[in-house]
Image: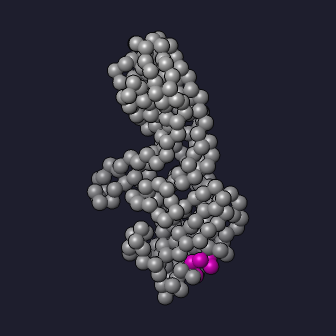
Amino acid sequence: MVFSKLKAILGSGIQVDTLLHEKHVVPGGVLKGEVRISGAEVDAAVESVEIEFTALVEDDSKGEDAAGVVHDYFRAEISGKFDLAKGTAHPIAFEVQVPWETPFNNVAERPLVGGMKLGVSTHLSLDQALDKGDLDWLTVEALPVHRAVWEALEALGFAFQETDLELGTIQGSTVPFYQEVEFWATEGEFHGRVRELEVVFVSGEASTDVVFAADNSAELLAPDLNSTIRFSLPTAEPGDVTETVKAQLTQLLAQKGA
């Protein structure tokens, strides 16, 4: 599948046509595409072309009607300086690694409920002027470790409620937001002992930290430590983690005295 956008920029007659070979990606995977720059009415000097990964983060302080704030959290240069002669075209093929900490908005081809949008934009620097193109939205599939924890929680009687992005940086993370995935204990041995479980992942190539917060009244950036627990799992091949998740939940509830 090819997705394209066309934009005339900077009053120069230059058009930037960005084509993504696939809009469905995975953290740590590769985003492939081509940027075609053409149509200059005069000779132009392009200083750089970059691909930016962005996320639309809701600002809870502004209430339900908040439009959200777009945060750029990773930028990759796909071209340095080059001269663009009048009337010529300059195609740039690119392959950019998707950051490991990119949030996911799809699990086993199921879109997730929540106010969260993820995308990329093309950033062009031309004669010391800058232009940032419109966002191309992405579908980001959950990693094996995300799915393993998800399946373990479902096996233990938890049901997914929603996910969103919150402003702030969790310890060990490098991005200015964190993804919060909310589950409710609807049946099983944890039903009645915990109502709401918030799950945060800090993903890396080799391992992923998992943070559980149970009925936590404070923000995860400054949590009630009795209400949170953090542990690590392999990112790529975690296997069945049901017993690990069960043990961590049991320990967490013991901390809370529940």
> Residue 208, how many percent across, how many down?
60, 62
Q: Please name whichever residue, 202 or 155, is drawn nearer the observer in this view of the structure.
A: 202
Residue at image location 49% in from the left, 88% down from the top? 257
One can see residue 5 in this view: no
Q: Tell me where the magenta segment starts and ends, as one range.
A: 246-250
Above or below for 39 versus 115: above
Side of 71 where 200 appears, left or right: right
Which residue appears farthest toward the bottom when viewing the image? 257
Name above or below for residue 160 compared with residue 78: below
Report whether 55 appears left or right of 111. Answer: left
Return the x and y of residue 132 as percentages of the image width and height: 40, 34
Snapshot quadrant of residue 154: bottom right
Number of callouts: 0
Q: Residue 93 appears at what percent x and percent y?
A: 59, 29
Displayed quadrant of residue 234: bottom right
Answer above or below: position of 80 versus 57.
above
Does 192 sit left or right of 127 as displayed? right
* Closer-to-camera residue (49/177): 49
The N terminus lies in quadrant: top right
Residue depicted at 56% across the width and 67% down the height: 210
* Residue 12 in picture, x, y percent from top left: 37, 19
Q: As displayed, is residue 212 above or below residue 25? A: below
Report the residue at 34% width, 56% height from top: 59
Q: Residue at x 49, y 42 (%)?
A: 75
Chief SS of the magenta region = helix
Colouring scheme applied when the structure was drawn: one colour
Magenta includes 67? Answer: no
| Depth check, front residue: 155 or 67 | 67
Residue 237 visible somewhere in the drawing: yes
